[in-house]
Image (cartoon, rainbow, N blue to C red):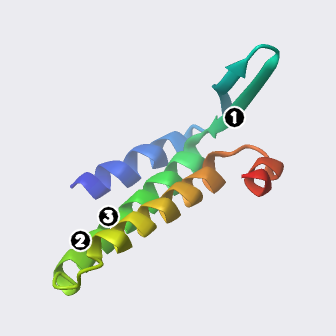
Amino acid sequence: MWALVCVGFPFRLYIFSEPPMVLRWHFIRYNAIRVDFPIAVDGTRLLFGCTVIFIACNIVQFSRVYISEDPFLERFIRILGLFVIAMKRMVFVPRMLFVLWG
């Protein structure tokens, strides 16, 4: 049911899509130096972001059953989490330059 909500809601936004809304997160502010992290949000990006989360959750569930005896299961899940963060960054960053920079 959760997967249906996660994939269905952004699909509704995709139908009524508009140009992406760009949010700026002020990462570091020190004197005159300011580092911003822009995030573009629209229906298509939300759909892809939820798809990444859905696939990652299924991989974690499968790995907990399939390799439950492996001593490095937690390391695998942490590496998968870093991969998911990288994929979500690629989805939500508005310019390719920022993807290559980070």
Q: Which residue type carries mark 2? A: Gln
x 37%, y 61%: residue: 54
On the picture, is 92 further left or further right than 11? right
x 83%, y 50%: residue: 97
Q: Which residue type carries mark 1? A: Pro
Density class for disc 1 (Cα within 10 Å; few <14, some 14-19, many ≥20) is: some
Find residue 27 and report its image quarter: top right
- Cβ atoms at labels 3 and 2 below 8 Å apart: yes
User: Mark 1 or mark 2: which comes first in sequence?
Assistant: 1
- Cβ atoms at labels 1 and 2 below 8 Å apart: no
Mark 2 — residue?
Answer: 61
The quadrant in which the N terminus is found is bottom left
Density class for disc 2 (Cα within 10 Å; few <14, some 14-19, many ≥20) is: few
Q: Is residue 66 above or below residue 36?
A: below
Find residue 15 and report its image quarter: top right
Query: In the rendering, at what x and y percent does residue 75 appear?
Result: 35, 71
Residue 57's mark? 3
Question: Which residue extends farthest top?
Answer: 31
x 74%, y 53%: residue: 99
Q: Which residue type carries mark 3? A: Cys
Residue 38's mark? 1
